[in-house]
C-alpha cells in the first residue's frame, strides 16, 4: 500500500498502470473551514484528475461526490443536474460542488462515473460504523433526559422533510455493482433511498426503539432553532448546528439511473425502519 497526498501535484506517488481508479478522499465535516475545504476537496480533486490522466490502461475513473451538491435547492433533484444556480448551506457542500464541476469538465477526457451518496449510517446487517455522526446525534439527544423528557425538546422544521439515510453496506454493494457495468461510464448516480422517511417518522421510530418520549414541544422554526444552537443549545445536545438544514430540506433525490442499472443485481436500499434496531444496538454497545 502506498500513501499519497491529494493536496500535492502528482500526489507524491509514482504513476502506474491501472484499470480502475476510485477517488473518495475529501473533507466530509459540515463545519469545515473554507480554506481547508478548498484545498482538499477542490484543489485535491484537480490534482487527482491530473494524475489519473497519466495512468495507462485506465478504464474507469470513479468519483465520489455527494447528493448535497444540490445545496439549498428544493424539489426533485435529478442525477445529471449540477449547475442550477443553487446556494449552499456550508463550505462542504460548496466545495464538493466545485469538485464535481471539475470532474464533469473531464467527461470527454476520462472514463468517468460519478457517485453521489446520501447520508450514510452503519451496516444494515451488523450495525458496524466508524463514525457516530448524523443520525447518531439524535440517538444521543433522545437518550439524555431533562425532567423525564428527551433533551431533544423540539424538532427543527415542520417534520415533513424527507431525510435520506442509506446504510454503508448498500453504498458499497451499489457502487461495486454499478462499477462492473461498462454502460455506466459517463453517468451520475444518486446512491440514495428512493422512498425515504420524513423527519417526523425518523424521530418516531427512534423514540420507539429507545422507548423514550417524543420531543415535548414538537417542532420549532429552523430560524429559531439556529438561534438556539448559536446560544449554546448545540453544545448541550452535542449536535452541530449545521445539521439543522438537513432536518428541514424540502428535497427528493431522484434515483432513475441507479435504479435502472441495479436491476437484476439483487442490490436494493433498505428503508431506515428495516434496520434501525441493528444500528441502534451497535451504538448502545460501542458509543
Image: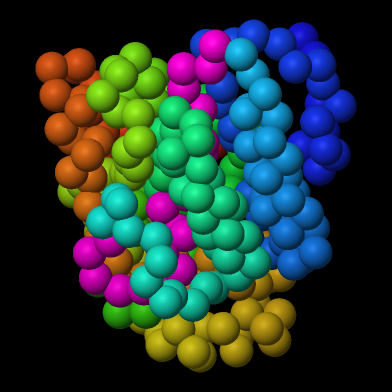
Q: Is residue 38 visible?
A: yes
Q: Residue at x 71, y 80 (%)?
A: 232
Q: Nearer the viewer, residue 183 or 264?
A: 183
| Residue appearing at x 64%, y 66% in the figure | 91
In the picture shown, does residue 106 fall above or below 147? Answer: above
- Give coordinates of residue 166: x percent, y percent: 37, 40
Q: Residue 209, percent across and down?
A: 35, 44
Q: Is residue 282 above or below residue 250?
A: above
Farthest-out residue, front: 108
Q: Percent from the top left, x then y, of residue 202?
A: 32, 56
* 103 drawn magenta: no
Decide: is 14 above or below 67: above
What residue is shown at x 67% (from left), y 53% (from top)?
A: 42
Residue at coordinates 69% horizontally, 64% vertically from top-left?
A: 31
Q: Nearer the viewer, residue 138 or 16?
A: 16
Nearer to us in this view, 194 or 59: 59
Question: Start and end of the magenta stretch?
Answer: 57-77
198 relative to 131 in the view: left or right = left
The answer to whether 100 is drawn above or below residue 131 in the figure is: below
The quadrant where residue 204 appears: bottom left
Residue 68 painted magenta = yes
Could you tell me if residue 198 is visible in this image? no
Q: From the image, which quarter does the C terminus lie in?
A: top right
- List x then y, in percent, for residue 263: 14, 24
Amino acid at each position: 500500500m502506498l500513501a499519497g497526498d491529494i493536496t500535492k501535484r502528482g500526489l507524491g506517488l509514482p504513476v502506474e498502470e491501472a484499470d480502475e481508479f476510485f477517488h473518495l478522499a475529501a473533507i466530509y465535516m459540515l463545519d469545515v473551514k473554507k480554506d481547508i475545504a478548498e484545498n482538499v476537496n477542490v484543489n485535491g480533486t484537480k490534482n487527482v484528475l491530473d494524475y489519473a490522466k497519466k495512468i495507462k490502461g485506465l478504464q474507469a475513473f470513479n468519483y465520489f461526490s455527494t447528493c448535497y451538491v444540490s445545496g439549498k435547492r428544493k424539489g426533485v433533484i435529478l442525477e445529471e443536474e449540477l449547475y442550477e444556480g443553487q446556494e449552499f448551506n456550508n463550505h462542504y457542500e460548496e466545495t464538493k460542488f466545485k469538485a464535481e464541476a471539475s470532474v464533469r469538465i473531464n467527461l470527454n477526457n476520462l472514463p468517468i462515473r460519478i457517485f453521489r451518496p446520501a447520508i450514510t449510517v452503519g451496516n444494515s446487517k451488523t450495525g458496524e460504523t466508524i463514525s457516530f455522526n448524523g443520525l447518531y446525534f439524535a440517538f444521543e439527544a433522545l437518550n439524555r433526559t431533562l425532567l423525564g423528557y428527551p433533551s431533544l425538546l423540539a424538532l427543527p422544521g415542520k417534520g415533513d422533510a424527507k431525510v435520506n439515510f442509506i446504510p454503508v453496506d448498500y453504498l458499497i454493494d451499489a457502487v461495486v455493482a454499478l462499477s462492473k457495468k461498462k454502460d455506466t461510464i459517463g453517468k451520475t448516480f444518486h446512491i440514495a433511498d428512493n422512498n425515504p422517511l420524513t423527519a417526523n417518522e425518523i424521530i418516531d421510530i427512534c423514540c420507539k426503539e429507545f422507548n423514550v418520549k417524543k420531543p415535548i414541544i414538537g417542532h420549532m422554526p429552523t430560524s429559531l432553532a439556529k438561534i438556539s444552537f448559536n446560544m449554546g443549545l448545540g453544545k448541550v445536545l452535542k449536535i452541530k448546528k449545521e445539521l439543522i438544514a438537513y432536518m428541514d430540506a424540502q428535497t427528493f433525490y431522484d434515483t432513475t439511473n441507479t435504479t435502472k442499472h441495479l436491476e437484476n443485481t439483487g442490490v436494493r436500499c433498505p428503508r431506515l425502519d428495516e434496520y434501525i434496531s441493528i444500528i441502534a444496538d451497535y451504538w448502545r454497545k460501542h458509543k
